[in-house]
Image: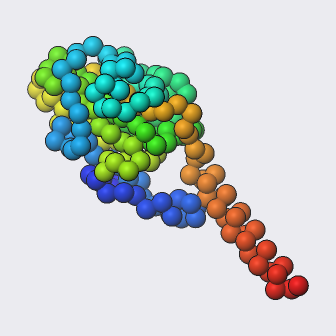
Amino acid sequence: MTIRALLPIAAAGPLLGAASPAAALLLTPDTLPQWTTSINSALDSGDVEDITGLAGLDLLYKFEVDVGEDSEPPYAGSYEGDVDDASGTIEYVSGPSIVCGVCVLVVKDGNNIPAQYLFNLSAGSPLWWNGTDDIVLAGFWPNQGGISHVGIWGVPGTSVPEPGTLGLLGVGLLVLGGLKRFGRRRA
């Protein structure tokens, strides 16, 4: 697995069906840009909008550390969380993925200051997340309680097919383009 801090992933490999190494987005309390809040209760969409200035966000995915469970359909089955104290990973496993046209990742403890970190994973952000790379969390509240929840907020209804499906679509378009060109030459 390749860990990237702020580097975009080349999109051509998956579209053409080429194998590419798994990548991950590494987030720490020092990763910028970010927002923080001292609100120690769970955030709702109005809170996230007030803090970030991004509108229309719904909770799309949540991992609750205490119960060790992924929740929030429709993406609960698409991702698996594995969080232990100050570190963890959110991993894409299969199914529809979240497309971060507009997305915010929230890392919560609630018993410390700041109580929550919010990261802009939206398209155009230096932290853009493609929805299938792992998200690696490291160094949050070490020796002070640790992560209690991780949530991904986004604009609902933005998902894409799995990378293999996109690869087949790309190959099909290339074949159709070739057939059309061949037909013109014969005429």
Q: What colour scheme governs how the chains and residues are painted in the rendered image of this protein? A: rainbow
Q: Is residue 14 above or below residue 34?
A: below
Q: Work out whether residue 35 can be spotted.
A: yes
**What residue appears at the point 31 percent right and 51 percent down from the top-left corner?**
126
Residue 2 in the image: state x and y as whole percent. Answer: 33, 56
Closer to us: 145 or 181: 181
Q: Quadrant of the C terminus?
A: bottom right
As drawn, 138 above or below 183: above
Left or right, 116 with respect to 133, comes to: left
Which one is nearer the viewer's eye here, 70 or 62?
A: 62
Task: Residue 17: name its quadrant.
Answer: bottom right
Q: Is residue 84 visible?
A: no
Q: Residue at x 21, y 44 (%)?
A: 32
Q: Quadrant of residue 150?
A: top left
Q: In terms of depth relative to the viewer, which is nearer, 111 or 65?
A: 111
Q: Residue furthest top?
A: 41
**Which residue is drawn at the image coordinates 36% and 42% (left, top)?**
121
The image position of residue 39, as x and y in percent, is 22, 17
The picture places residue 60, in percent across and down from the top left corner, at 47, 28
Seen from the viewer's position, the closer of residues 126 and 14 is: 126
Q: Is residue 181 left or right of residue 25?
A: right
Query: How many callouts does the rendering have?
Result: 0
**Where residue 74 sits: x, y (%)?**
55, 27
The residue lying furthest to the left in this view is 143
Which residue: 60% across, 45% down?
A: 161
